[in-house]
């Protein structure tokens, strides 16, 4: 018969104490295993949340760029309106000067009429078109801002 060699050399009063220690060690090992599995699960979950947060952040950055582009376009259109207004004012001044000095000549009357048409085109067509573009730009900015706020809320939820 094979002989079993026990490394435990217990006395009569030790078995109960060692059994409790054994249960504690087993409980601790189970807790460590649970902690390790939860760390592994959170390790899987954390990259997912990080990827989602990065995605939201990239969308926010993209929307910020679009808002900046629209702001630049609005600034460009405002500058163009100023330039057109200055041009119209200059043409009006030229017409006044021409009428005051040599307005009775036949060729000058044609120049004055042409300037009047230009002034009318600028004031009634070109400036309102630019103003309409500015209004459309503000509408786009408002739309992008609402979208960015919604995505920021999602990002904050992911981070939390």
Image (tube, helix red, strand yellow):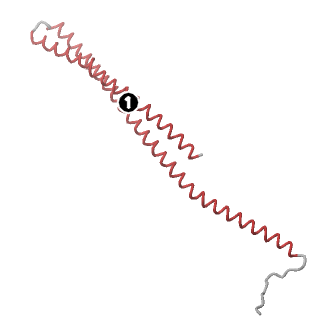
Neighbour tally class for label 1: few under 14, some 14-19, many 20 plus, Cα within 10 Å: many
Give left or right: position of 2 versus 15.
Answer: left
| Image quarter of residue 101 | top left
Position of 8 relative to 41 (above/below): below
Expressed as whole percent of the image width and height from the top left, the position of residue 21 reads 81, 70
Q: In the picture, residue 120 is in which quadrant?
A: top left
- Residue at figure coordinates x 47%, y 37% from the top left: 147
In the picture, the quarter occupied by the N terminus is: bottom right
Q: Secondary structure at mark 1?
A: helix
Using the image as rendered, state which of residue 92 and residue 136 is in the foreground.
Answer: 136
- Check the image and report above or below for 94 versus 153: above
Q: Residue 125: x percent and y percent?
A: 26, 20
Q: Which residue is mark 1?
A: 137
Residue closest to the eye, 10 or 124: 10
Residue at 14%, 8% in the rendered image: 103
> Which residue occupies 48% across, 45% down?
57
Q: Position of residue 59 (x, y in %)?
A: 45, 44
Q: Residue furthest right?
A: 13
Given the current orientation, which residue lies at the most extreme front position? 1
Residue closest to the far left: 106
How many circles with numbers are drawn on the protein? 1
Q: Residue at x 64, y 59 (%)?
A: 38
Is 118 displayed left or right of 74 in the figure?
A: left
Q: Position of residue 94 (x, y in %)?
A: 21, 14
Q: Quadrant of the C terminus?
A: top right
Specify the farthest residue to the bottom. 1
Q: Compare residues 27 and 2 and report the one nearer the observer.
A: 2
In this rendering, would 142 be left or right of 39? Answer: left
- The picture quadrant where one finds residue 40 is bottom right
* The one of 53 and 82 positioned closer to us in this rendering: 53
């Amino acid at each position: 018969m094979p002989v079993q060699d026990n490394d435990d050399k217990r006395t009569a009063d030790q078995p109960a104490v060692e059994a409790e220690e054994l249960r504690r060690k087993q409980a601790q090992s189970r807790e460590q295993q649970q902690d390790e599995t939860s760390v592994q699960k959170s390790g899987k979950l954390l990259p997912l949340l990080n990827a989602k947060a990065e995605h939201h952040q990239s969308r926010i950055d993209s929307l910020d760029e679009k808002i900046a582009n629209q702001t630049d376009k609005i600034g460009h259109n405002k500058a163009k309106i100023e330039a057109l207004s200055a041009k119209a004012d200059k043409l009006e001044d030229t017409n006044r000067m021409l009428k005051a000095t040599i307005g009775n000549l036949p060729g000058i009357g044609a120049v004055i009429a042409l300037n009047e048409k230009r002034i009318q085109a600028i004031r009634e067509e070109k400036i309102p078109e630019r103003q309409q573009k500015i209004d459309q730009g503000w509408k786009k900015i408002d739309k992008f801002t609402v979208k960015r706020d919604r995505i920021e809320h999602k990002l904050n939820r992911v981070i939390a």
